[in-house]
Amino acid sequence: MRHFHSLKVSSVRQETTDCVSIAFEVPADLKSTFDFKQGQYLTLRKEINGEDVRRSYSICSGRQDGELRVAIKQVEGGRFSTFANADLKAGDELEVMPPMGNFFVELDATKKRNHVAFLAGSGITPAMSLMKTTLNEEPESTFTLFYSNRTSSEIIFKTELEDLKDRFMNRLRVFHILTREPNDIPLFTGRIDAEKCHGLSKSFLDLPSCDAFFICGPEPMIHAVKDQLKLDGVNEDKVHFELFTSPLVGALKETVKKEVKEEDKGKAAAVEIVLDGNRMVFDLAYDGENVLDAALKKGADLPFACKGGVCCTCRALLVEGEVDMDVNYSLEPDEVERGFILTCQAHPRTEKIVVDFDQQ
Ligand code: FES
């Protein structure tokens, strides 16, 4: 179940001048609850200056590492990231929700596959988990990483990446692309955009023999790489991406708010929320706030973090009725098909909707 658990921080490690990684002590009775898949994330909660602040951070440890660790890069004006980078220390306790997320492929030790990642900045965090776990669990597979940063001093996990390259010499390739440091090879300078993606793929990959692509970074980069891979003949099923929350998300949320049809204006729906087997019912206008906010106001203790359609923490199954979602950056097509919705983005479009948080 998606409930917060209080976990003790076992170590805080400075990764770069503006990024720390923190590991948690997981008590024996919570080991299975906090068992994770490579590429998943944790939602953390802390009361900061009297405010309930929640943020999701990707796990950077591999499944074999024997620890649960996330990386937190300082974001300008970011309340949680500032707290984590400035004040958090070993021995402190944080509220932590069990691992979530779909940014992975199921691994199979008998398969010989080629995995590829295009990353920018802190997008390396889930990729560390993906890469370490894949190289360990698929002993014949390869991993190629294209990793963009402004300068070499901003490369997170630089030493660990070097160590991994030494350890998996024939199966791991890491290419650094720097936007503010010139390089004799033009391909390694500048942003990862469509052209760069095409150039890198052409020079270092045999695209038809690549089995999985992981893209993690800001939204424009994700779209550029995704679209270019498609143009270069890569099947969309092979492409996985993880959007990191950016101010853009808030802006988009405003501009893409779903319109209510003329004939539905003024209508309200009976909303039934199921959580931990308990039911709550309330009325909600079609053009009112989203299902999550409305239920929170009624006192429901629902899981959420970004409220921007990015983290998927507020996911629930729509058992009855229909909704419109403003944006969806995180549900996979098959989840939408099965009826899952992001409650922070959902508005009712039928006179009754039933939303079940207990279905996984
Ligand atoms: S709370 Fe993050 S997607 Fe809804």
Image (spheres, helix red, strand yellow):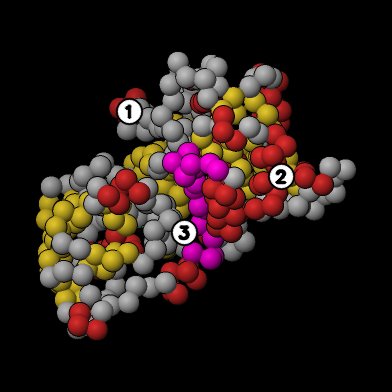
Say which of marks 2 and 3 sits in front: 2
Q: In this view, does 12 lie to the left or right of 338?
A: right
Q: Sequence-wise, which precedes: disc 2 or disc 3?
A: 3
Under tag 1, what secondary structure?
A: loop
User: What mark, if any, has residue 199 been given in the picture?
Assistant: 2
Distance CA(mark 3)–CA(mark 1): 29 Å
Q: Residues within 10 Å of mark 2 (few under 14, many from 20)?
A: some
Under tag 3, what secondary structure?
A: strand
Whether residue 137 is visible: yes
Given the image, on which type of amino acid does mark 1 rest? Ser
Under tag 2, what secondary structure?
A: helix
- Observer-nearest of 18 and 90: 18
Residues at circles 2 and 3 in contact by the CB criterion of under 8 Å: no
x and y percent of residue 333 in the render?
35, 49
Whether residue 185 appears in magenta in the rendering, the answer is no
Q: In this view, does 222 lie to the left or right of 145?
A: left
Q: Sequence-wise, which precedes: disc 3 or disc 1?
A: 1
What residue would you read off at disc 1?
A: 32
- Observer-nearest of 96 and 108: 108
Q: Sequence-wise, which precedes: disc 2 or disc 1?
A: 1
Residue interval drawn in magenta:
233-249
x and y percent of residue 254 in the render?
43, 74
Given the image, on which type of amino acid does mark 2 rest? Gly
Say which of marks 2 and 1 sits in front: 2
What residue would you read off at disc 3?
A: 48
Q: Residue at x 43, y 56 (%)?
A: 329
Compared to residue 131, the image places residue 350 above or below, namely: below
